[in-house]
Image: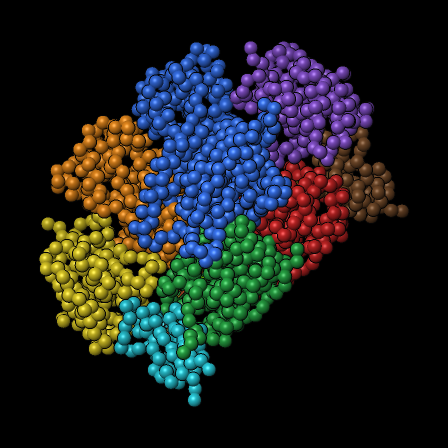
Chain colours: A cyan, B brown, C orange, D blue, E green, F red, G yellow, H purple
Amino acid sequence: MAKKTRVTFAADICKGCALCVDACPKKIIRLAPETLNSKGYHPAEIIDQQACTACGFCFLMCPDVCITIEKEVN
Amino acid sequence: MAKKTRVTFAADICKGCALCVDACPKKIIRLAPETLNSKGYHPAEIIDQQACTACGFCFLMCPDVCITIEKEVN
Amino acid sequence: MADKVLMKGNEAIAEAAIMAGCRHFFGYPITPQTEISAYMAKRMPKIGGTFLQAESELAAINMVYGAAAAGARTMTSSSSPGIALKSEGLSFLAACDLPSVIVNIQRGGPGLGGIRPSQSDYFHATRSTGHGDFHMIVLAPNTVQEMFDLTLEAFDLADKYRMPAMILGDGMLGQVMEPVDISRGNNIKTYVKDWALTGTKGLRKRNVVNSLYLSAEELELLNFQRFDKYKEVEKIARTEDYLLEDAEVVVVAYGICARIAKNAIDTARKNGIKAGLIRPVTLWPYPKHQLKAAAEKAKAFVVVEMSMGQMIEDVELSIRCSRPVLLCNRTGGMVPTREAVLESIEKAALLKGEQNADSI
Amino acid sequence: MADKVLMKGNEAIAEAAIMAGCRHFFGYPITPQTEISAYMAKRMPKIGGTFLQAESELAAINMVYGAAAAGARTMTSSSSPGIALKSEGLSFLAACDLPSVIVNIQRGGPGLGGIRPSQSDYFHATRSTGHGDFHMIVLAPNTVQEMFDLTLEAFDLADKYRMPAMILGDGMLGQVMEPVDISRGNNIKTYVKDWALTGTKGLRKRNVVNSLYLSAEELELLNFQRFDKYKEVEKIARTEDYLLEDAEVVVVAYGICARIAKNAIDTARKNGIKAGLIRPVTLWPYPKHQLKAAAEKAKAFVVVEMSMGQMIEDVELSIRCSRPVLLCNRTGGMVPTREAVLESIEKAALLKGEQNADSI
Amino acid sequence: MQIVFEKPKALSDTPTHYCPGCTHGIIHRLVAEVLDELDITGETIGIAPVGCAVIHFNYFECDVAQAAHGRAPAVATGLKRVNPDNIVFSYQGDGDLAAIGTNETIHAAARGENITVIFVNNAIYGMTGGQMAPTTLPGQITQTSPYGRDTKTAGFPLRMCELLATLDGTAYAERVAVDSVKNVLKAKKAIKKAFQYQIDGKGFSIVEILSSCPTNWGLEPVKALEWLRQNMIPYYPLGVFKDKEVSR
Amino acid sequence: MQIVFEKPKALSDTPTHYCPGCTHGIIHRLVAEVLDELDITGETIGIAPVGCAVIHFNYFECDVAQAAHGRAPAVATGLKRVNPDNIVFSYQGDGDLAAIGTNETIHAAARGENITVIFVNNAIYGMTGGQMAPTTLPGQITQTSPYGRDTKTAGFPLRMCELLATLDGTAYAERVAVDSVKNVLKAKKAIKKAFQYQIDGKGFSIVEILSSCPTNWGLEPVKALEWLRQNMIPYYPLGVFKDKEVSR
Amino acid sequence: MSQTVEIMIAGFGGQGVLFAGKILAYAALMAGKEVSWLPSYGPEMRGGTANISVIISDTPIGSPIVDNPGVFVAMNQPSLEKFEEEVQPGGLIILDSSLIQLKVKRHDLQACYIPATKLAEDNNLKGLANMIILGRIARETGLFDLDTLYLAASKSIPERKKDLLAFNKKAIEIGYNY
Amino acid sequence: MSQTVEIMIAGFGGQGVLFAGKILAYAALMAGKEVSWLPSYGPEMRGGTANISVIISDTPIGSPIVDNPGVFVAMNQPSLEKFEEEVQPGGLIILDSSLIQLKVKRHDLQACYIPATKLAEDNNLKGLANMIILGRIARETGLFDLDTLYLAASKSIPERKKDLLAFNKKAIEIGYNY
Ligand SMILES: Cc1ncc(C[n+]2csc(CCOP(=O)(O)OP(=O)(O)O)c2C)c(N)n1
Ligand SMILES: Cc1ncc(C[n+]2csc(CCOP(=O)(O)OP(=O)(O)O)c2C)c(N)n1
Ligand code: SF4
Ligand code: SF4
Ligand code: SF4
Ligand code: SF4
Ligand code: SF4
Ligand code: SF4
Ligand SMILES: [Mg+2]
Ligand SMILES: [Mg+2]
């Protein structure tokens, strides 16, 4: 079974640019359709943490460094 | 027999740089040792017009365009 | 009224330049005057003109030098730091008596500063736009209509007197949109420029545009002659006056400050203070005679400007320090409020009218 | 006397800079100040310093900006057109409160002008060295000894007040050779610069050197604070006086003109005219109080300068236009003669001492 | 669980002012990661340009000098000459570096000035609202090329890496892009190498990074990266143009 | 007898102010001969630089604008844009063109500005009394490199033709020398070609001419040409670096 | 007596406040009035707030700066918070109640709540909340009738976007009649 | 009474007038006097004329400019023509009679002719006419003795040219004793 992972978004800093959405090979990120952050953006959120491999693609493409990725060790 | 030629130096403009002296393949130009022009230079002069072929080398190297070269037309 | 169009101040300048026959504009982007370039970029290709975004302000002013030397009506435009970069070039334009129009839509400084409106390049425009002894004509619009009108006039004066002319605006005047009557732009004078570099065509002696004189005697003579010309140019000095006739407190302000001052003067009048306004329209030549005349009746002066106090020197010199002069100023992009101007007027109204010799 | 060495003015500046601890010089050649670069090029490599011939005056002033930001004593030097090119950079230095020394060995302008001595960058140095509201300290030597002394002082003042300081000389002062006592250069103060960019080493918060403020409020506050500091700096204003005590005609002149004026004053005294001299040593801050005090006793002033009349404005403002002021000037590289100064003194002696209100 | 990807330490917590999807942000992160990995933040001095990155001193946790438009390489020279042990890098846009600052760029390179230049090429003047840059592509529409850049009047784009590679003082010049994960990783490698070259005293190093400006290109961020890929990369080929220690 | 060599008409009778043996004079003559031969003096506008050639308007019989130091290509651009039918050439030294004016040079070339640049490279600042130029050779002694140009601190010379050849707007770039009769003849050919390219509207053309400065090199004129041959030519190889009509 | 109305519209960068102001200005121009239109400007607008000051008057306008608007429109909450205190007593505040949860605190002026953004979305006029507000301004102030606004809108919309005119008109009408 | 001597030496660019002036200045410095040395400067010197103004005084020197020299040396004809009229009445003109055919026209001053260039060539001291003149100045004016001049010369000559000092001394001596 795949290792446990966690992707956290700093929703307040997120600008809803969707670069992470586009970058995720698992297509498990979306811009929260109902939420607006204090800057008026729909922040990114993960919709299927299980499927996440912690590959880091979303992190690598995020211009606002609002993503933190954790992974179970060994 | 070689064609007649004439090399004229505008002695007043000449700065005695000797580039023509150096360029002449016939080595028939010198800086007049006794003459000083109004600017204080020893101007160039030709010492053997007969030997001149009107090759133009002196003209081509003269930075002050003080040389005029004539040649007999046949 | 029917003929008026809504335009930003920056656009009015650009349109006026085009109507004045300027077909060669050289710019470099900088806030808050980018609309001028944008306008030119749109229009010039359609009318066979040149819009060229130069690699820098330095290149732009030297392209203007070339185009002016060729006899064309030409313009460049920038804002404070970019104008500072043109200092050497402006000195060259003046030294070669080349007609040209320069626009400075001022922003707060020093350094990179900010992008909000300012008038802190007054000294640079009127005193030392570059090295050496010279002047430019400096015109100070205070409405979008005047951005248009004075740009037309700048081209005319530049050609007439063979010297650079500057439009000295600020970020607010550049950005504000107001109705403009552009019909005046259809009536343009032209000047013969037999000194221009267009090629001798073998028909005349070569023309030379040059400012190097290794003989100090010669250079001095030229400077003296140019300053004689400036004496002539001094005649164009002009103001717009408002309620000046009986004014005891005279506000002196140019550009956007003059409009704020008008509002304050209206209120002051309501409050029983005889306040009036002198708005210099030409900053060089400075309307010193007009100010002097006003000093005869006035008790005190208030200078309103968006700088640490620059035009105030011209006011004091014009009135020969004969009346107290208060400074009501903001800097760094801040704009004086009507209330602050009113307060200064009220303070001035209390003054005796005798020059306080210690006020410096 | 035994310790004196013969030096050109330009060399004296360079040697003083080195003795003041300047190890970073950035220049670009221009007559009549090339000796400064030449001197630096010779000496710096021997003492572990940097002489760098920049690609342009713009690059040079911005290298100075970098070196000053790093906390070093640093200098650049040029002549009029080159100084005009530094306008933007100088504004940045002032805006970031960066201590630095700039030398302007003036030559005749405008434009390329000539290479003969001039004082026509007075306005540029004292009024608007660039865009925006700011000042530099401006020191005006009149002997080679002072070229040395004031350069030492410029480094000290720049560090003390955290601002750029300029040595305003002219081609003649740069080229003249006179004996100089350099022993003073051995006694140098240093200043702690905890604001300098040297790397945080992880031990402090980052230092930032910056002049951009998108908030106009913030920029205004900084400008006000800087001008408060300038009020402090005004205390260093100073003059050298000569026969001023009982002077009825006060000659005001700086730099080489002051020396010519001294000769003329000697002659005037012989001819029975009570003439004296005020020589401003600091041009900014201007010694206005000293002039004001002199105006109380004097009947008339004569300003001698090598420009179309620039410092004269400071004289008039300082004395609040209370006395007639005559201008004795040359321009474009010409130098006033003793005879011309004497003539002006004689003319001034005939004036009533009342300000002729129409003299503007 | 262990953190595998997180904000580098050399980056402050201040949220950036960049537009949504602007890749200036990615480039900032890459530079910060390199500072972290080389452990040089404490020795580093950054130069902020005039351009959208003008206030990058709010983001990088090192000393920073803001420089006049285009003069960053001259400012860097001044800083480096005073303290050669500091690591000095300038971060410049295409207007800053390749228009007004061309001269300073070329001469810093020619001198082999031991500094690092991070050159963000987004083919436009971002900060002033989208005017033509020296690197704007032929036909590209901007505020000052409203009918598309016409090479007849506005000339041709500059390829700075190619230009700088001709100079003896340039030790390292590489062009990268941040349009994809793969390219972002390559970009980071290049940036790291450039800093390493400086640490090793090898001479002038520059990394040109093709970057997006969704706002002034008028494209959604994802589309902007596509546009970059399809239009900029063919014109500005990626790769190493110079890699050779400067021999004095 | 018939005159076979004489002063070209495009050159005035005014004696030049150049030092004895300074090859600025030869280059003047070549340009004038080309103007004569192409019969374009009446359409030509020259730009005088700041440098020893600053008053060349006393010598060339065409209209002339004296330009601020380094800005000749910008001035040329202004002139050419107003009257595209004029033939516009700038005449610039190495300090003027390759130091303070590098930016204007590069961007005029990048724009493919249809002008001709006569670039006189004498590896020194002549007019100001012999300071180091960007083209001063490594080790060469000048007033500001009194121990010889040290590439560690003063960097490396610029090879302008090589640099400009990388630009799409450059139509023609050739380096020649005037140290010998043979090279003088080649130089003239190059100059003529450059003007012809402008006449044909092909784009930016530049001829770099290796020239001597006997005064500031401290050498007799003849020795100076030898020095040029032995030192400059190896560093600045002669030849054509670009020859290709600019395609817009 | 001459009348002068000082209007300020404030919101996020993309909400079209500058454009709404421009139509107002055109309407005033066509009505033969003096008018000035002054935007906040510059890079800091990016992602931040934008506002526009419009002055409409029977007599020449002094300063184009509006420090104390008679009519104030808030299209987002920060704007309301920033400017509420500055509105003239007896003035008018219009706010987009679909984006702003707060109520106007002051009682010395008139407050008007209109869910402009929601209205726009509901009517398939996404992005035209600004036009809805515009209609409302006209109605509340009585400055212009609908026809003048339509004309002004058609003057303000660039040629290549003329097909959008109908939507704009519809939005204006919705606001006017809300 | 304090004494001030104003000296001008003028000639062609290469004749070493600046250097001659420098030695004078050093001599004055060593004699405990105030001194200033002011060259004409700049590119137009090239091939043209150069001149040097030296003022030697017991009191601080005002202007370093010499408009009316008390002692004037002409090392070529153009210089004589240019400056003769400016020399102070009662002053001294020294000229190199091997290069200047003209005579001094004025009668209100002292004229001294010395064939310096020829003397130099005859004594194998080519290029040291300036030093010969220097010796003559010292003798004619009585300003310095030979030893002071020698010392000043050795101070003025750069280290790497010290081997030429003897020639310089010899030339000075020739001029002094001519
Ligand atoms: C001397 C000067 N000229 C012009 C400007 C205006 N200006 C600010 S940023 C900029 C260009 C920014 O473009 P770029 O360097 O490409 O950076 P980007 O914003 O695209 O990252 C300009 C021209 C200025 N501040 N100073
Ligand atoms: C703005 C400015 N900077 C510097 C100078 C001084 N200056 C005059 S000529 C020159 C350089 C000349 O060298 P180069 O261009 O190589 O021409 P050359 O004399 O060697 O032919 C310089 C730096 C100036 N006149 N203006
Ligand atoms: S770490 Fe990889 S898989 Fe997980 S959300 Fe991010 S991009 Fe998708
Ligand atoms: S890439 Fe970053 S800023 Fe953009 S949507 Fe994803 S988390 Fe938000
Ligand atoms: S023409 Fe030829 S042969 Fe005759 S003098 Fe000249 S170089 Fe010599
Ligand atoms: S080359 Fe010309 S200037 Fe030189 S010596 Fe010969 S003729 Fe005279
Ligand atoms: S304007 Fe362009 S470059 Fe600037 S922050 Fe926005 S997207 Fe980025
Ligand atoms: S200084 Fe050099 S380049 Fe200038 S004229 Fe003399 S020899 Fe020629
Ligand atoms: Mg960019
Ligand atoms: Mg040169």
User: For this rendering, which residue is in front, B36 or E163?
Assistant: E163
* Residue shown at 33% from the left, 34% from the top: C313
Placement of D122 over or under D267, stated as above or below: below
Residue at 70% across, 57% down: F237
What is the quadrant of residue G38 in the picture? bottom left
User: In the rendered image of this protein, does residue H13 appear above or below residue E218?
Assistant: above
What quarter of the picture does the C terminus of chain C occupy? top left
Which image quadrant shows ligand 1?
A: bottom left
Q: Is residue C215 visible to us here?
A: no
In screen coordinates, is G77 left or right of C10?
Answer: left
Question: Where does residue D282 sit, x and y in percent of width and height?
Answer: 43, 31
When the figure is inspected, residue C221 is found, relative to residue D52, above or below; the finding is above
- Along the line of sight, which residue is nearer the eye, F48 or D82? D82
The foreground one among G15 and B9 is G15
Task: Indicate the quadrant where residue D164 lies.
Answer: top left
**In the foreground, D207 or D283:** D207
Q: Residue at x 81, y 32 (%)?
A: B33
Image quarter in which the N terminus of chain C is found: bottom left
Residue C324 in view:
yes
Instruction: Residue G112: give x, y in percent of width and height.
Output: 13, 65
Residue found 37% across the figure and 32% down from its top: D235
